[in-house]
Amino acid sequence: MILAIDQSTSGTKAIVFSPDGEVLAKSFIEHKQIETKEGWIEHDPDEICKNVIAACESAASGQTIDAIGISNQRETSLCWSRKTGKPFYNAIVWQCGRAAPITERLSDHADTVKKICGLPLSPYFCAAKFKWFLDNVPEAREAAKSNDLCLGTIDSWLVFKLSGSHKTDLSNASRTQLLSLDTLQWDPWLCELFGVPINALPEICQSDDFFGNAEINKHSIPIRACLGDSHAALYASSFFESAAKATLGTGASVMANIGPERAKNVTSGIAECLAWSISNQPAYALEGNINYAGAIIKWLVEDIGLLGSSSQSGKIADSVESSNGVYLVPAFSGLGAPHFNHNARAAFVGMNRTTKKAHLVRAAEEAIGYQIKDIVDEMAKSGLTLQSLSLDGGAAGDPFLAQFISDILGIEANASTLGELSAAGVAALAARTQFSFSRKRYTPEIDSQKRAALFEGWKIAIKMITNQ
């Protein structure tokens, strides 16, 4: 039996899987989303750790657990004491753009940074967030002087709290902007550039390494796998022989496995990273990240009251034949891949007197598909041609959205019927096996002319809010 910890932006799931991939038990606990007066986004590290333990103990109650796998929200950055395990500050969430001034000062080095680590220079990634801690949190700065500082992502925080060891896997390390994709080690030049002490960073491990033992319900259980949540979903999608997937959560990750070597001619708008490294066999990936996907629908519900619940969104969108020329560019905290414009701000574009609520909702749903097409088109410039795309995450269960993604991409989209694909992926890796799941297949229903016209409107909307 495998216990998967899926620690996401919105909360923590603990799921027990049988050897053949059946979900036997699960527990979910939300954590608070902290928004500061500056518009910064944070999480309480201690609350997350407390919730992880509570969810694990609940899900694993009465079960005999053989191993633990951890999948996690990525780029969310933390700093804590090596001696006490106490956080020096809240976690800076991946969406938060507070470190933008740091990356702006380093803009002359953007090409070199991308050449080494594969990532566009951006406050989205961890390196600039780590530097922000050192610049703005005196306790962290003092701890660095005495080798008491730990810097890491959520996986390394949980591994530290559960087992006492400061470790991370290569999938997460490759998203920090401090890892060399050629040596697969922390890069001294990058660490010096960002002012991050290497000795504060976690030990880099294989994704299927032994990370330590965790005590759950008074039983010592080995942690046998760690993967970033998007990587774990891709690993599970690979059971379907799919080379690419889109995870539709709070944000979205479009990721394609390109094999054991780095890609050539990757454009500035696409990130390179490690999909995983298993038994010293690395698999590289191309990825584009979207800041707002499911969070758009949550915004419609919670902030502007356009919907009563998220479940209404797809049905209302499907109640009209089109968005009536309306586009939503969801740049609430800037635009992610492939634009990487942190100054852009969100807007509905193209409204007129005949615009109805359903048109706005449809525009919001379609914005997710347009952002995915932006990324897929950018990947194609590197020579990658997709025949199909696997969909997972909560929004993959929205038939309207899944069909629109197939329509706007012009390829088959396969939506997982299992809502726990990240957890399933890391559980399968921890179990050293593969699981099989069913999918719902969507094929394009619009012609190329209509597809081009719709996407041209999106590109115009992007230009309007970015002044390009």
Image (tube, rainbow, N blue to C red):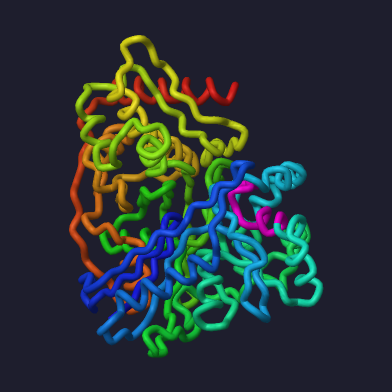
Give the vertical position of 269 relative to 357 (above or below): below
User: Total of numbered circles in the picture?
Assistant: 0
Q: Which residue is at 52% across, 41% downward?
A: 337
The reply to whether the magenta stretch includes residue 320 is no
Please give left or right for residue 400 compared with residue 144 in the image.
left
Q: Which residue is at 56% across, 49% downward?
A: 41
In this view of the protein, which residue sits in the foreground, 26 or 468?
Answer: 26
> What is the residue that sits farthest to the bottom in this orientation?
219
- Asked whether residue 468 is in view, the answer is no
In this view of the protein, which residue sits in the foreground, 264 or 5?
Answer: 5
Q: Quadrant of residue 59?
A: bottom left
Give the vertical position of 210 relative to 118 (above or below): below
Q: Which residue is at 36% across, 62% downward?
A: 422
The reply to whether the magenta stretch includes residue 128 is yes
Q: Position of residue 373 (x, y in %)?
A: 40, 36
Q: Specify the quadrant that holds the C terminus.
A: top right
Q: Position of residue 251 (x, y in %)?
A: 44, 47
Q: Which residue is at 35% across, 45% downward?
A: 386
Q: Which residues are magenta?
A: 120-132
Q: Position of residue 372 (x, y in %)?
A: 40, 39
> What is the residue that sits farthest to the top in this orientation?
353
Give the vertical position of 47 relative to 254 (above or below): below
Q: Position of residue 260 (x, y in %)?
A: 47, 64
Q: Specify the quadrant that holds the N terminus.
A: bottom left
- Asked whether residue 458 is in view, the answer is yes
